[in-house]
Image (cartoon, rainbow, N blue to C red):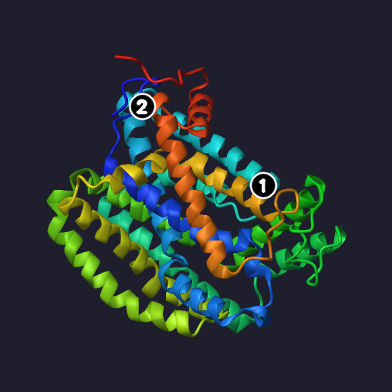
Amino acid sequence: MITSTTNPRPRILFLDALRGFALLGIAAANYPEFSLFDFLPDTIATASDHTTRFWQTLLVSGKFYTLFSILFGIGFSIIMDSAMRRGVNGLRIFYRRMTVLTLIGLAHLLFLWSGDILLLYALMGMLLPLFRHLPDRQILTSSVICLLLPIPIEAIRQLSGHSPADNLYALWWQTANSVGITTDNFATWLRDATSYADVFAFLRQGAVERMWEFVSTSRYFKVLGLFLFGLWIGRKQIVQNLSAFRTQLRRVCLTCFIVSLPLNIVMALHPTDNSFYQSIIYCIAVYPMGLAYATALALIYLRLPNLNIWHFLAAPGRMALTCYILQTICGMIIFYGIGFALGAELSLGMSILTSTLVFVGEAVICHVWLRRFAYGPLEWIWRMLTYGKRLPLLKRQH
């Protein structure tokens, strides 16, 4: 699928479009935190905020993280497959690619946004080659086991009254308090930041908080499970041959919507902070809904493959890394004190609307960029660091 390091592999339009759709949902999920709305006390939320939160929980929360993670797994399967076909130490190239992504994720976490997911993706991605020789059935079984593991882990934590994340929680607040961040100013610290030094102080404690979140929610098992499911999809060549799987796609789509929609409505009407119940909800409500989105879009694509929306979504999908980081930069400019300082000022609905406008702007920029260039800027850098050589960015003229 790749004949040289300088030529991009053939693109799969639907896969790029699905990745762009996932980026839209990721922005809608993340921008309430960028806008600092998620840090504000519930007592100041209006009736409109509560209504918006219902729809966000029902349609967005967890679903696009699920979809994005599955897509990463599919992407990893394509990367590993193409590396093996080249026959030049494909695993070495794969691990160099993951190492570079680790550094990008670490820099994003420490210097831009505490909600980074790239670091965890890169670290979990490094485990995927360990499964490369397993039969498809065992990969799928391993995926299910990883996705289910958080449930018994949470049960043990609650029964024992102790969590390995407790020490991280204490370290988080110790780090926060050391720079003057408390529960009283947590929600407004970034809005009131007058310099990047203030932002960096928040990011220091935020990095520890992120580690606590990963451990306390068993996020690493969830991500690995979704990656393995994406790896299984990639092995089956489902995305490359959608029409051959039309019947199965219909069955999965219908089943997932029937099972997950009522449970997501219950979750949206009666949210809970209990991690044990949340781990169950993820398995029987959130994951299936994310899969339902993917299969529904696949069925629409099979019926209406010439819609302009596919190309609109595919452009940011081809530049997913660049767009993900750009969403962070836009959030900092719009909401933090070093920018327009709109944080903690907008309603939840306005925060999500802002995320949509940012994504649309990204899509337009991506379309213009890809007319002339072969890769997004960060994708180009990532690729060059992987292969250790300078690669052309401009498209070849024919």
Q: Is 380 left, or right, of 186 in this rendering? A: left
Q: Is residue 336 visible?
A: yes
First in residue order: circle 1 vs circle 2: 2
In this picture, is 238 found above or below 381? below
Q: Is residue 132 visible?
A: no
In this picture, is 79 found above or below 256? above
Instruction: Identify the residue at image location x=66%, y=50%.
Output: 332
Residue 107 drawn at (x, y percent): 65, 41
Q: Secondary structure at mark 1?
A: loop
Q: Residues within 10 Å of mark 2 (few under 14, many from 20)?
A: few
In this picture, is 258 found above or below 130? below
Give the alpha-carbon distance from disc 1 to disc 2, as whole Å. Answer: 29 Å
- Residue 210 placement: quadrant: bottom right
- The residue wearing badge 2 is 8
Q: Is 51 left, or right, of 71 in this rendering? A: right
Residue 159 drawn at (x, y percent): 59, 83
- The residue wearing badge 1 is 112
Residue 347 drawn at (x, y percent): 60, 69
- Residue 83 placement: quadrant: top left
